[in-house]
Image (tube, grey):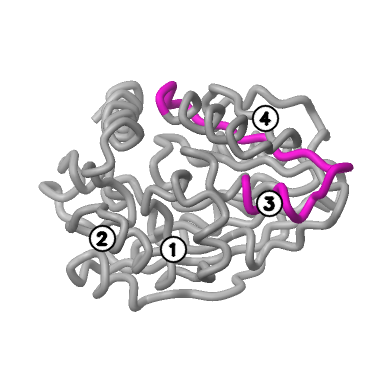
Amino acid sequence: MKNNDVKKTVRKAYSKVATNSNSCCCSCGYGGTDQQTVKKISKSIGYSEEEINVVPEANLGLGCGNPTAFSNIKEGDVVLDLGSGAGFDCFLASRKVGKTGKVIGLDMTEEMIAKARILAKEHGYSNVEFRLGDIEKMSVENKSVDVIISNCVINLAPDKSKVFKEAYRVLKSDGRMYVSDIVLLGKLNEEQLNDEELLTGCVAGALLKHDYLIKIEQAGFKVKILSEDKEISKTQYNGLALESIKIEATKP
């Protein structure tokens, strides 16, 4: 599948998720997204009861970890969320950066951005901004961000090298990137690679773990693996050879 076709497929799927609570994509495994299921998924990947209840309407059951929990976000930081969806992680990050900080959510799906902006206004998150854009070509200034977070999104990007190079560009010196993402532990067959459901479900577009880490390092980052969740394969991905990896990448 060509890169533009991949993006069209992903955008269409996540537009549906944003406007239809019964739709399902990344980290939903192959179940539904009723509130009970969403809560169960969220707890299994690291969100506390308190975090889940902050802006529950923004939690769509997407993700494969909780980057706001393991990221070193400080008061006053500028935080960028790659693939921010309805804004769930942005709202959690905004509480850490405080009134002197700022959170920017970047997403390529118009429906997600619209939903996130409405929720930010309704809940009074004045230090959060949502921008429509592509994580392969970020609408963010050079060296303007302290911390980048991303939750199960980079695997959806056709050109991951571009994503990591862009992340390096927008981060300040000593800036940090905290990523939770799906990586493969074995190769997929041709049929799986071309399966649209596996693509939008964060599998078909994922890289082998080694290749994923190499691309981050090639962008200039110092990489540290914080944790790995292999159980997610059984609980949400029908036993496919993959894991959720949590990474800290530091810009020198």
In 3D space, how far apart are the residues under numbered discs 1 and 4 (Cα atoms)?
Answer: 32 Å
Q: Dot 4: few (<14), some (14–19), or many (≥20) neighbours within 10 Å?
A: some
Residue 94 counted in the magenta span: yes
Q: Could you say where residue 234 lies in the image, as x and y percent from the top left? A: 24, 75
In 3D space, how far apart are the residues under numbered discs 4 and 2 (Cα atoms)?
Answer: 38 Å
Residue 129: image tag: 4
The residue labelled by disc 1 is 209
Q: Secondary structure at mark 1?
A: helix
The residue labelled by disc 2 is 187
Q: Residue at x 62, y 30 (%)?
A: 121
Residue stretch in magenta: 91-111
Q: Could you say where residue 91 lies in the image, as x and y percent from the top left? A: 62, 47
Q: Amino acid at mark 4?
A: Glu
Q: Nearer the viewer, mark 2 or mark 3?
A: 3
In 3D space, how far apart are the residues under numbered discs 4 and 3 (Cα atoms)?
Answer: 12 Å
Q: Amino acid at mark 2?
A: Lys
Q: Amino acid at mark 1?
A: Lys
Relative horizontal placement of residue 228, taking residue 234 as reference (left or right): right
Of residue 21 and residue 144, the one placed in the foreground of this image is: 21
Q: Nearer the viewer, mark 1 or mark 3?
A: 3
Residue 38: image tag: none
Q: Nearer the viewer, mark 1 or mark 4?
A: 4
Q: Nearer the viewer, mark 4 or mark 2?
A: 4
Q: Dot 2: few (<14), some (14–19), or many (≥20) neighbours within 10 Å?
A: few
Q: Earlier in the sequence, mark 1 or mark 4?
A: 4
Q: Secondary structure at mark 4?
A: strand
Q: Name the image quarter holding the N terminus.
A: top left
Q: Residue at x 22, y 67 (%)?
A: 240
The residue labelled by disc 3 is 93
